[in-house]
Amino acid sequence: MATDFDLVVVGAGAAGLLAAVASRRLGDRVLVVEADAVAGGSTALTDGRLWLPANHLAAKLAADSTDDADAYLEALLGPVTPESSAERRSAYTRTAGKLARWLTSSNVPLAVVRSVPDHQPDLAGGKAQGRVLATQSLDRRVLGEWAERLRSDGDGGGGLRRLLPGRRPTQTPGEALAGHLLHRATANGVEVWLDSPVVDLIAGEDGVGGVVVRREGTDTPVTASRVVLASGGFEQNQELREEYLPLPTDAEWSTSTAPNAGDLLGLAIAHGAATAGLDEAWWTPVMLADGRAWSLDEARGKPHCLIVDAAGDRFFDESLPANTAGRALYERSRGMRAVPSFLVLDNRHRQSVPLGPWPAGTTPKKALEAGEIVRAHTLNDLAQALGVDRAGLLGSVVRFNGFAGKGKDLDFSRGESAWSAASGEHAGRRNASLGKVDKQPFWAVKVYPGDSGTKGGLLIDARSRVLRADGTALPGLYACGGAAASLFKGASPGPGAALGAALVEAFLAATDRPADG
C-alpha cells in the first residue's frame, strides 16, 4: 500500500534536510529518503561554507545589497543561458539574504568567515569579505539516537559513528550545518528513512506523483504532492563522467565523499525532464594520496611553489580560484600533456604548509615509497623522477624565482588580484603569493583536474521546478544542488557557491506551492 506525504525529499544532505525543515514548518507531512546509511551527504565532511550575498551578518563588515549581488553575477556570468536565466539569478540574490536570516532565526549559528573575498572581487559588485558564512560547532549529543547516523570524519567512509569521550563536538562546519538541520527535522516530525534508495518515480497527473523506495528489501510506493530531488550529481559514475565530462576524467579525482551516481538523473529524464550543463563540474586541482583525492587549494596559493606541465612549463596563475584553476588544466591539455601536471615546491613550503593528508613538515615514508610525493635534492633529479622535461623545469624555476625576487609575476600576475593576495602569506612580503623555489630538498606531487561534484543536471526554473525540453514545468518535481544544472554556468562567484546555491534552491522548492501557478 502506498504511503502518502505532501513532500518527499530524496537525499538527506544539508539541502535535502533544509527543504524538509522548511516544508514541515509550513505544516506539510514530510518524508526524507536517503540511499546511504548515514545522513549529512558530502556536506558533512566539508568546510560547509555558504556564499550568501546581501546577508544580515555582514552588515558591520562590508556594505552589500541585492543590487550589488545582481551586478556581480551579471559581470561574472555574462549572457543568460537556459540554466542561468535572469529569473534564476534574481531569485538567488533575493533569497540568499532571506535564507541566512531564516537559518539564524532557526538557531543555526552562522558567522561570517572573515577576510574571505568573492572569487573575483574586482568585478562590479564584488566584495572583499562578508558573503561567505559558516556554521559554528554543534554538540552531537543533542541529536540523541540520531547522533550515530550523522556522517563525520570518524565514519571512515560512511558507516555508523560511535560517540567517543572527547569527540562529541562536530568536526567540521559542514558536519555542524548538517547536524543542526537533522536535529530540527527529526525534532519537528519529519520522517527520515536511511538505507532507502529511490528506484523509480511514480507518474502523477501529467508529471510526478511520488517515488518508489527500496526499504528493507521491499519496494514501497510513496505518493506525494511534490518530490524534491536533493540527491547530488553523478561524480561517482565513471560511465557518465566519460560520456559527458571533458577527457580524461576519473571518479577517483573527485573530492566528493557521497555515493552520487546520477541514478535519479536517468529516472527524471525518463519522465520528460530536460538537462543542461552536463559537461561541467565544480573543478578543483587535486592530488591523490591514501586512496582518495585531496584539494590543493591551500597549498598552491602559498609562496615557494609553482605548477608545471610535462614540458616543465608554467601555464597559469597557480593561486586562481578552484573552479578557474581546474578548467586551466583541461584548457592546457588541448595542446600539451597537462594531465597530470606537477606541483613543485621547495622545503620551506613543505615545512610550513599542509599538503593533502600530511601536516606541514610531515611526509610519511610510505607516501614516498608509493610515489604519492617525490623528493629530490636537486631540480634536475626531480625532473628525472617525474618524467618532466629537465630544461623546461629548470628554466621555469629560474624565471619564476626572478619574478619572486622582484615581487611581480610578469607571466601570469600571480598575487596581484584580491583573491590571490588573500590566499597567500603576508608577513613582510611585497607579493603575498610569490616566494622563490630554491631551498633543498625539492618536492612534487601530481596534479589532476578534480572536482567537488558535477555541475550539470536537471534544468530548473526560479522556483526550483524541473522543466521539460519545451520550457514548461514538470508538475510535482523539483531539484536542487547537484541534482540540478547550476545557475553559475562556467564560473564560481565565491567560496561556498555550490552549497549556498543548493540551500537556496532547496528553500525555494520547499516554499513553492503548485497553486501559485
Image (cartoon, grey):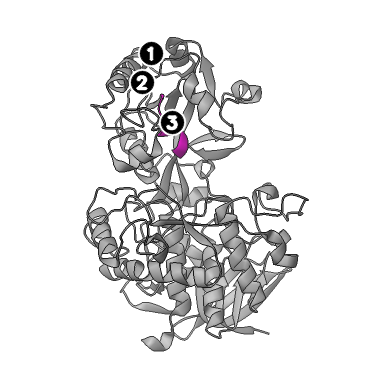
Which residues lie in the magenta part?
Answer: 297-304
- Amino acid type at circle 1 is Arg
Q: Residues within 10 Å of mark 1 (few under 14, many from 20)?
A: some
Alpha-carbon span between mark 2 and mark 3: 12 Å
Residue at mark 3: 340
User: In the image, 165: left or right of 403?
Assistant: right
Q: Is residue 425 visible?
A: yes
Which residue is labeled 1 in the image? Answer: 390
Q: Residue lying furthest front in this view?
A: 60
The kind of residue tagged 3 is Pro
In what element is the residue under mark 1? helix
Is 250 displayed left or right of 4 in the figure? Answer: left
Q: Amino acid at mark 2?
A: Gly
Q: How much space separates mark 1 and mark 2, taking CA atoms?
A: 7 Å
The quarter of the picture where the C terminus appears is bottom left
Marks 1/2 in contact by CB < 8 Å: the verdict is yes
